[in-house]
């Protein structure tokens, strides 16, 4: 064939033969900090032809996702929707919409994701102040009260489930404290939604976000977001535009609300998947789901103790969805992880930041929170540790 161009176009196979081979995806048991394995029913839901993002059938599905998300979070917030993007996009959405330049934002930092909140809040020109705790510990209500008294922030931001440490932040009383100081409460629920008890309204949480690929066992790329009427009011009163067009809730509310104005092309297949994941959660029931996660995690903790391994977090504050286990002396953390992956097809996570090389992170989230997975992991761990 004669080329229309005078230059020759390099073909892909000249560049990389592997890239034109048929797609191959290894089957893994994902027991790390996320993604977790998606429920097969969720994958089946995703595996449809797309439909239009303004198709009445799709709009109905969006409404159902909102209803199901409110249930999962235990909130009645009208402004509850799914952001197109991963958890970090929904995280950014909370800050982009809530932070006005110069607003004081107090952030509890006891792990990697607290630091990410600091980084993001700063980019939206918040006056950031932080409260620090060693990685693996949590903030007490009196520590939060002292910091609030000293700082008088407009927003207090906490991570309920610190995926980098495996610690669960207690929330009882924090919302009341925030109201006393006329402050909004922002909560990261990325590794808690669908696995750890959450009562957004009872706790007085004003802004929260999550992801699809952890406790909800969906594919990554679509992320729950919610704002209380108090937070919506702050947004309504802000004099400037939200400095992020894609995540501007004043625009997104018109698509998710009755106007149905086009904003962006929704990731429709991911919406199919998320709806199915949330439907499965509702069918199981929150209480049963939380209990399943707790029981599976306790089985893991007992099994780790039998192997002579130590959990990094005190039992009272341990997350059922993510466990950090200390790497024993003389063991190379990365070598063991590589062996689990290549010899047993099991993924676990390594330590982040301060805990790099010191812990492994074991996730038992959503569909993966099953006793058989604990048995599979413990037996593989035992063999690898003895080898
Ligand atoms: C995973 C995670 C995020 C980021 O979510 P992505 O889906 O990876 O963008 C934020 N916060 C916490 C606590 C997380 O575990």
Image: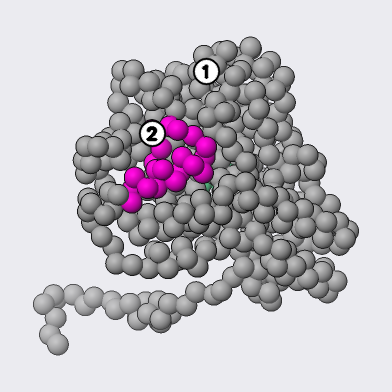
Front residue of 209/372: it is 372
Rendered image: mark on residue 79: 2
371, 113: nearer the viewer: 371
Q: In this view, does 145 lie above or below 89?
A: above
Residue 262's x, y, as percent? 21, 44
Q: Quadrant of the C terminus?
A: bottom right
Q: Are marks 1 and 2 in contact (CB under 8 Å)?
A: no
Q: Can residue 345 be seen in this view?
A: yes
Q: Is 135 inside the magenta-drawn segment?
A: no
Predominant secondary structure in magenta? helix
Colour scheme of the picture: one colour
**Residue 343's x, y, as percent?**
69, 76
Q: Which of 252 and 324 is in front in this view?
A: 252
- Graded by Cα atoms within 10 Å as few (under 14), some (14 to 19) or many (20 or more), the crowding at tag 1 reads many
Residue at image location 67% in from the left, 62% down from the top: 370
Give left or right: position of 347 versus 97: right
363 or 13, nearer to the observer: 363
Q: Residue 165 — which label?
A: none
Quadrant into which the N terminus falls:
bottom left
What is the C-alpha distance between the residues marked 1 and 2?
19 Å
Instruction: Decide: is 203 above or below 193.
Output: above
- What are the residue bounds of the magenta stretch? 61-81
């Amino acid at each position: 064939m004669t080329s229309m161009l005078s230059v020759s176009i390099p073909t892909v196979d000249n560049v990389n033969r592997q890239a034109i081979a048929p797609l191959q995806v290894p089957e893994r048991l994902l027991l790390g900090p996320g993604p977790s394995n998606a429920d097969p029913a969720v994958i089946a839901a995703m595996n449809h032809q797309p439909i239009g993002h303004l198709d009445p059938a799709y709009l109905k599905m969006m409404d159902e996702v909102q209803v199901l998300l409110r249930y999962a979070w235990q909130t009645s917030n009208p402004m509850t929707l799914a952001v197109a993007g991963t958890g970090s996009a929904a995280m950014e959405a909370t800050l982009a919409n809530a932070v006005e330049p110069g607003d004081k934002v107090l952030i509890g930092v006891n792990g990697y994701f607290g630091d990410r909140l600091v980084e993001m809040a700063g980019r939206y020109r918040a006056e950031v102040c932080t409260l620090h705790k060693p990685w693996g510990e949590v903030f007490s209500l009196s520590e939060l009260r002292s910091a609030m008294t000293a700082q008088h922030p407009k927003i207090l931001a906490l991570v309920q489930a610190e995926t980098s440490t495996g610690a669960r932040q207690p929330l009882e009383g924090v919302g009341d404290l925030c109201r006393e100081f006329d402050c909004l409460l922002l909560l990261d629920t990325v590794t808690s939604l669908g696995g750890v008890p959450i009562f957004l309204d009872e706790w007085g949480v004003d802004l929260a976000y999550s992801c699809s690929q952890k406790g909800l066992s969906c594919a990554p790329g679509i992320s729950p977001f919610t704002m209380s009427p108090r937070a919506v009011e702050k947004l309504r009163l802000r004099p400037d535009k939200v400095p992020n067009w894609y995540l501007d809730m004043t625009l997104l509310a018109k698509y998710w609300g009755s106007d149905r104005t086009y904003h962006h092309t929704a990731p429709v297949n991911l919406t199919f998947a998320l709806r199915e994941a949330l439907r499965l959660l509702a069918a199981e029931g929150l209480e049963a789901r939380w209990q399943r996660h707790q029981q599976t995690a306790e089985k893991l903790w007992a099994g780790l103790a039998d192997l002579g391994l130590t959990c990094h977090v005190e039992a009272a504050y341990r997350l059922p969805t993510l466990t950090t286990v200390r790497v024993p002396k003389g063991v190379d953390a990365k070598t063991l992880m590589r062996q689990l992956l290549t010899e047993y097809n099991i993924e676990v996570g390594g330590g982040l930041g301060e805990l790099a090389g010191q812990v492994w992170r074991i996730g038992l989230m959503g569909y993966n929170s099953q006793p058989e997975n604990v048995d599979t992991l413990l037996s593989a761990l035992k063999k690898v540790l003895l080898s």
